[in-house]
Every structure is written in C-alpha cells, then in structure tokens.
Image (spheres, rainbow, N blue to C red):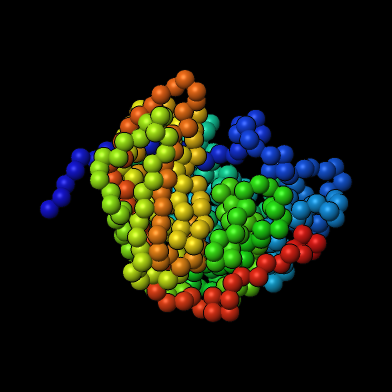
Amino acid sequence: MWAAQPERLKRDKRSILRIFDAPDNALEEDYPQQYDDEPQWPEFNDELWQHEWYLKDTRSLPGLPKLDLNVLPVYERGITGRGIRVAVLDDGVEYTHEDLAENYDPEISWDCNHDTPDARPNFQDHVNSHGTRCAGEIAMVANNRKCGVGIAFGAKVGGIKLLGGHVYDLIEGMALGFAHDKSNFTKEAPNITWRDVQHIIVNTAEYIPLQANKGWTENAAGLLYNIRFGFGLMNADAFVTAASTWMNVPPKSTEIILPKDFAAPRNLSTSIGTISVTFDNATGRIRYLEHVEVQVDLGYTERGVLEIFLTSPRGTKVQLLTKRNRDKSKEGFRPWIFMSVATWSEDPRGMWEVQILDTSPLGIFNSGSLNDCKLILHGTEEIPPHLKDGPRVYNMNYVRR
C-alpha cells in the first residue's frame, strides 16, 4: 500500500514569444515579415481571416518561404474537423462567446477546480483568457463575419478547467482522464494511435520553409531536425494524405540502460568543466528509436549554468539542456528527466554518451555532483511499415508551391 499527502503543484500557461522577449541569439528570419498587399482569399467572410497567415499562403513575393500550414487543400477535400471533439485543458473556455458557442461541446467540458460542469474562466483575472484563445484557434466558427476561422472549424471543442485555482495531483489526474473515451485522433484514420500521429508528423513536416534558420542537423536515419523547430513546419495536407493509408507502427518497447563504470558521486565544478557518462547498449532489443530519455540526479550551486548533450552510437549529437541566465536555483535536478526525439528512427545499439558542462562566466565558481544517471530508450524491435521503403525523401521544391 502507498499513500502520500496531496501536494500543491504549479502549472504555467504558455504564451506567445514576442520579439521583445526573444533570446539574445534569436535570428531575424525567425519572425515572419508582414506585407500590406497580402492576397485576399474568398473562402471565408470572417473579418480576421485575411490576417491568418498560418492557415493560408500570404506571400507577396515568390522567393519568400512558405510559412502556412498547407490547410486549404484539406478544406477543399471537405475535411474541416467535423466529427472530431477537442478538449482544451487550461484556465477555462468562454463558451458563450459568439464565435465559439455553436461549436462548444458541454459533454467533454468540466471545471476540475470546483468539480462543476461550468468550465467558464474566472473573469476577475484578465490572464484567464488563454483557454478561450486556444479554443478559438482550434474551432472558431467559420463564415459568420466575426473574428477569425479555427483551423478545424467543423470540430466541437470543450473546456477542461484546470488552471483556475490550486492544482493538486488529484485535480490534474481528473483533468487528464476526463471523458477520454469520447474522442479520436482523426476522422480520416480513426484507428491510428498517438504514436502513429508522431510518426506521421516526423515524416510529413517540412524542412525547406525553415532551412535559413541555424541549427539543422541530419540524424543517422536521414531525418532533419532542429532543436527549435523539431522536424519542421507542419504540412496538414501531407499529414492527412499519409494518415488515410497509414499502417500502424509495431508495439513499443522500453529499455533502461545503466551507465558503464559509474561510481557516484561524480564531482563537477567550474574548474573541472565537463564530465561524461557512457552507456553500453550493444545487446539492446530495440532497433528503431522513438523517444530517448536521460534521467539525472544532480546537485549544483547554480543550476542555470549547466548544459547537457547526448550523443548516440551513430554519432548524432543533440543538446538536451541549454544554459539559462535567469535560473539561479540551487536545487539542482533531483531527479530530472530530459527527453529528445532527435535520434528518431536510428538504431540505438552501441555506445551512448552524456556530457554535462559548466558554463559559468569568468570569475564565478560553481560546484556540485552527479549522483545518478540512466538512459531510457523507447522504440520498436520490428521495422515500422513506412520505413520499409527506405529513408524519408524531402520535397526540396516545397516553397515554390
């Protein structure tokens, strides 16, 4: 039997990365240009439709990158989200809003903070509009001459209110499990799993529109990956096309690899600079990787100066943790799991290496110790059907469409 005192948790809402909040090393090409002579599309009469550059191609010059999500061809097939139900776990949804009311689904909505069916936000706090904004981006009503158009404007959307008060494990569990049996992933392919969805994204996201940005690397399975953009820009038309004929990936296997010749604690300091931990996975069963996790238990006098890198047996090196100038915590990582998908589809057999670096500025000294470290591999022993035809082939002319 196991029991524990409920602990209040802290959950933060995501927001837009505004230019004045951007990191010092951000590039100009990360932020799309806006032009006064945007082409007008006749498909919808909603007043803000012409500004939804992420749903339609608004390029005014042919040499500019294609930054929309290629959704219009999906609409032309008659696929608008109809028959799909989407729940937004957030601070509530203003379901009486005239651009949401028609698409609101009370059956998949609940206020977990107060255990009531009314999922409206607390209007006393102006920041409690995040869930409503997310719901609108998903399922704003189309062709009502108001606001904009949701990306799946035919879908039904619900609100699960989680961030409207104190959050405990019980409340979070209630939110994550509420009405879980009343939805599926896609109308076009209702039998695909959450893992299939990830495989489809990896194999249909577009690298070309974002290629001018730094940080792209090709892993040993021939997939292009960027620490900021993942596998590229979502391509809705390609995703739906792939999903319509998709064959499910094999069952997932998980392996936990302990470090080789590791004696705890391993000391690290500004003067030492770097420590490395190796993992021998020569006899592993997994042949085709999905997620890789690195769990560390590490104490340090200033957590924000640490960086962590992972190198796969096939030579793919990915940064799991960057330095963070505002992270002055002395708590370290006790324990903490870092995850990466950069080595997706690689063969994980062989020697892995984890490097932990101290990047303290000149004149500052920090120290600590690594008490434990383990590698957790997720993937399949059998080859996924879509890989039988060989590595992915990228459409290098995508931006010319």
Lateral position of residue 141 relative to residue 364, left or right: right
- Quadrant assignment, res 369: top left
Give x and y (percent) for residue 95.
53, 47
Lateral position of residue 83 relative to residue 55, left or right: left
- Residue at 51 percent of width and 51 percent of height: 318
Give x and y (percent) for residue 370.
31, 40
Residue sitting farthest toward the top: 363
Q: Is residue 274 visible?
A: yes
Camera-side residue: 300 or 174? 300
Question: 173 above or below 202?
Answer: above
Question: 347 above or below 69?
Answer: below
Question: 323 above or below 234?
Answer: above
Lateral position of residue 100 relative to residue 327, left or right: right
- Quadrant assignment, res 275: top left
Give x and y (percent) for residue 114.
35, 42
Give x and y (percent) for residue 233.
65, 56
Camera-side residue: 98 or 319? 319
Camera-side residue: 304 or 15? 304
Lateral position of residue 147 relative to residue 372, left or right: right
- Residue at 19 percent of width and 43 percent of height: 4
- Residue at 70 percent of width and 53 percent of height: 211
Residue sitting farthest toward the left: 1
Question: 367 above or below 37?
Answer: above
Q: Is residue 252 visible?
A: no
- Residue at 63 percent of width and 56 percent of height: 232
Q: Quadrant of the C terminus?
A: bottom right
